[in-house]
Image (cartoon, grey):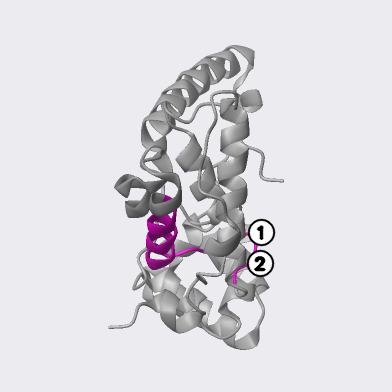
Amino acid sequence: MMSLATRIAPVLSLVVLSWTPVWRASAEQTTVEQNQQLARTIYRYFAANSGHREGYLICRSQVEELQRYLRRTHGNIPAIHRRLLNRVLADEAPLTTLFYTKHGEAVLCAAANKLAGYAKLEAAARMAAGRKQIKAAIESNQSDALVEFVKQEFPVKSRPNPSQQGQQAGQQADQQADQQADQQAGQQRARTAFARIYTLEQFIEAALATPSSRGHVSTS
């Protein structure tokens, strides 16, 4: 069966092979320079697909193609690890199939920008009511109603204001909140290695955030 990526856009062209040099990390290159080179290579590879835009949702078959290319040109690097591929949405995931429809890319990308990412949209796409809202937004080519639905369905938990409980109660609440925040931060760090990858930018960050790819990456 033809993959979603093959159906929705031209296969990332082998023309890329004609201009991208084989990876030769010299001893003089710093880790930062190597990371910058790798980031540029990945961006240019995806740029060969004229349908891809910054912030667009990526799917597993697209990353599989990218990793096969990187394996040929760069060898055994963290960016080709299977665990990265497993963090990308499958082609048949509800959000993926909705994204790659007419107007889907533009509407859902705009909604993701307003919602600080695709996570809540993915959660909404698992619900019948959520899929209905997403389809309506795509059909009308408008994201505002979808954003409001998602915000109501998945509200941001705000920290309670303890001022009405007196100064002492407020201090205790602050201490408890700080302890809870520390625990949540630790849990978040533990989950980082398994967090969902939705965009090409997130894929590059994840690929370089490994012990063998230390340093900072420039995506310019």
Q: Name the residue under label 1.
A: 114
Q: In which quarter of the image is the N terminus?
A: bottom left
Q: Is mark 1 on a helix, strand or loop?
A: helix
83 shown above or below 179: below
30 shown above or below 151: above
- Counting from the top left corner in percent of width and height, residue 58 is at 49, 63
Query: 125 or 64: nearer the eye?
Result: 64
Residue at the (54%, 55%) spot, across then down: 200
Q: What element carries label 2?
A: helix
Residue at the (52%, 58%) spot, across then down: 118
Residue 216 visible to an observer of this rendering: no
Q: Residues within 10 Å of mark 1 (few under 14, many from 20)?
A: some
- Counting from the top left corner in percent of width and height, residue 213 is at 48, 31
CB atoms at circles 2 and 1 under 8 Å apart?
A: yes
45 shown above or below 96: above
Is 68 placed left or right of 165 in the picture? left
Which span of residues is magenta-colored?
52-70
- Counting from the top left corner in percent of width and height, residue 78 is at 40, 39
Residue at the (60%, 55%) spot, across then down: 43
Q: Mark 2 points at which residue?
A: 110
Q: How far apart are marks 2 and 1 (CA)?
A: 7 Å
Residue at the (46%, 41%) spot, across then down: 207
Query: 50 or 74: nearer the eye?
Result: 74
Amino acid carrying label 2: it is Ala
